[in-house]
Image (cartoon, rainbow, N blue to C red):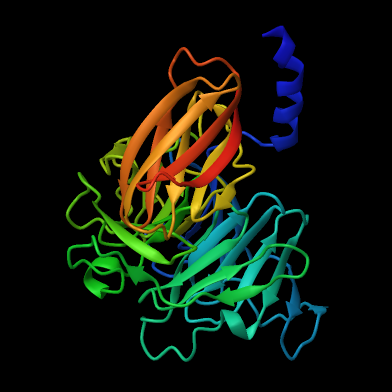
Amino acid sequence: MKKITLPLLLVAALFAEKSTAQSNKAYAFTGETKGTYIWTAIREIDLSNGSVIRTLYSNNDAPNVSYTFINNDWGAQKVNPSNLTPTINGVAAAAFDEKNNRLYFTPMWGNDLRYVDLNSKNISVVVNSDANFSTGKHVDESNVITRMVIGADGNGYALTNDANNFIQFTTGKNPVITNLGALIDSKNNNGISVHTQCTSWGGDLIADVYGNLYLFAYRGHVFKINPTTRIAEHLGVVKNLPENYTINGAAVDANGDVFVTSATLTTGYYKVNLSTLNATAIIKSENEAVYNASDLASSNLAYRDAKNTPVTNVVRNNGIAIYPNPVVNKTFAIQFDKMPAGNYTIEISDINGKKVIAKTLNINGVQNEKINMPKSSATGLYFIKVVNSNGNAVYTDKFVVE
């Protein structure tokens, strides 16, 4: 062990990335008062119990707001028009960019992407009217953007009700907005389409460490979305919610559960286990009403481990990816993307060439496989190879187990 400890530390350092702990801080778009249905107030809430930490913005307070307009007729300039409000007639789609400390959102029935600069002492709003964010004239609710999240790749993703506009936006100095097109129903959806109003409109998006997104629709249906392929796979329906409870906001809490809110009901909040889709009530004081929230935004990612290991060095080759790398808790995932259907064998060997895992899988479409290293596995460098049914290696790489 002494011979490889230093090199392994150096290898790990190459992959390492600064990571902050997942927290229970989130932002909620709510009514000005509990039970009102115009969601114009922005509140910071505690996902452990649903309590309000502070109110960031409220029309009732009439705060001084500064604006910066880009990609429109105003040009890149700062103004302070008295007839403008940041959230206009309500917001139903938002995402928190922890890296830049920005709260992104789009007003309902609007066609611009906005963010509140949380680094500013005052309320400072940037309005981006890039035509690529526009989903056209809103004749009905079908092409209204109601879902948004920041993915594990650092990009933002927004989705219209009808799922025909799946939009990606970068969060750097010079933002790039791309309409990726319509989501595609997985062939395993058994007739439940991500485009259907009664099952799949409204709700919110969350993200996991593996690069996937999850749509929690307002009627409780959950879809897993691969941003690369745009395939949406129906996972099931959230269990144990009251019959009239609609899911409108969703955010991952510090423990990896999904905190959900209703835009209309003030009776309480729930948390959902993403693996089982079981919901449990978040207990508050008896008869205490909560803010009905149309959307939630946190920086947390589902399936992030207790050490908050960042997703780094995701290697793609012939439609295969492994992550995280370095591996923590001796568990990682392999994602197969656009691979020809068939049997594949995963072979993992240690630094001395000893085979520690040989596992055969039948791959058919987009698929994630969780790999658990043997408990006796030492920390160090390992080699992975994926072999097709003809015995040909279609993927080789190395990874580090911490």
Measured as percent of width and height from the top left, residue 139 is found at 39, 91
Figure quadrant of residue 313: top right
Looking at the image, the residue that sits furthest to the top is: 2
Q: Is residue 57 above or below residue 10?
A: below
The percent coordinates of residue 41 (x first, y second) are 53, 62
* Residue at 55% over, 83% down: 134
Residue at screen point 74% across, 62% down: 172
Q: In the image shown, does 324 or 72 lie closer to the viewer?
A: 324
User: Quick check: 308 left or right of 137?
Assistant: right
**Whether residue 330 is situated above or below residue 319 in the rendered picture:** above
Q: In the visual, does 167 lie left or right of 21? A: left
Number of marks in the rendered image = 0
Q: Is residue 264 visible?
A: no
- Residue drawn 30% across and 64% down? 186
Is residue 133 at least partly visible in the picture?
yes
The front one of 302 and 285 is 302
Residue at x 35%, y 63% (from the top left corner): 232
User: Does 22 sit left or right of 137 as displayed?
Assistant: right
Give the x, y percent position of residue 358.
39, 29
Q: Residue 119 appears at what percent x and percent y?
A: 76, 53
